[in-house]
Amino acid sequence: MGHVYVEARLRGPKQGRRLKMLVDTGSTYLMISPKLASQLGAIKLPGRIPTSFADGAREELEWTGLIVELEDRRGGAIAVIRECEEPLLGVEALEALGLKVDPSTGKVEATRAYGARA
């Protein structure tokens, strides 16, 4: 299938940014750099989230909540804050937006009618 990228908009308290994100179906949360978190005006939430990586490494990371806009859908998602080459879009945000990756096309598509579920 290869890498899947999407054009998404992340919104924080200060501003929003449209950016290219790598969809990582092996990741739970969004991952953004400290610089991007600062630009968005992200408010760091209390404590840290224990996080494990594909290489077996583990870290406790700062985190925040952001609004994600993708495919004409909008919802909230958790983002961990860590140095990274590119922002990652994890499955929690995809699920919140009712989206999935179709492995046959390498594109993001709807899994259900759009609307937040509570």
Image (cartoon, rainbow, N blue to C red):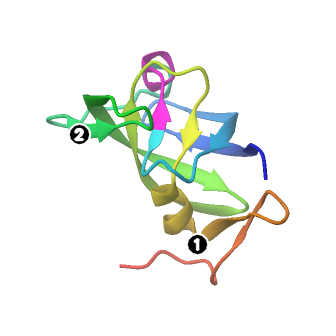
Residue hosting label 1: 98
Asked whether, in this view, residue 84 is left or right of residue 113, the answer is left
Q: Amino acid at mark 2?
A: Ile
Q: Position of residue 46 (x, y in %)?
A: 15, 36
Residue that sits furthest to the bottom in the current view: 113
Q: Secondary structure at mark 1?
A: loop
* Residue at x 61%, y 26% (from the top left corner): 86
From what the image shows, is residue 94 above or below residue 67?
A: below
From what the image shows, is residue 80 above or below residue 65?
A: above
Between 51 and 17, the one nearer to me in the picture? 51
* Residue at x 66%, y 39% (from the top left corner): 22
From what the image shows, is residue 99 above or below residue 35?
A: below
Residue that sits furthest to the right in the current view: 105
Q: Position of residue 12 (x, y in %)?
A: 46, 37
Sequence-first tag of 1 and 2: 2
C-alpha gap between disc 1 and disc 2: 24 Å
Q: Quadrant of residue 102?
A: bottom right
Between 27 and 110, the one nearer to me in the picture? 27
Residue hosting label 2: 49
Q: Position of residue 83 (x, y in %)?
A: 45, 18
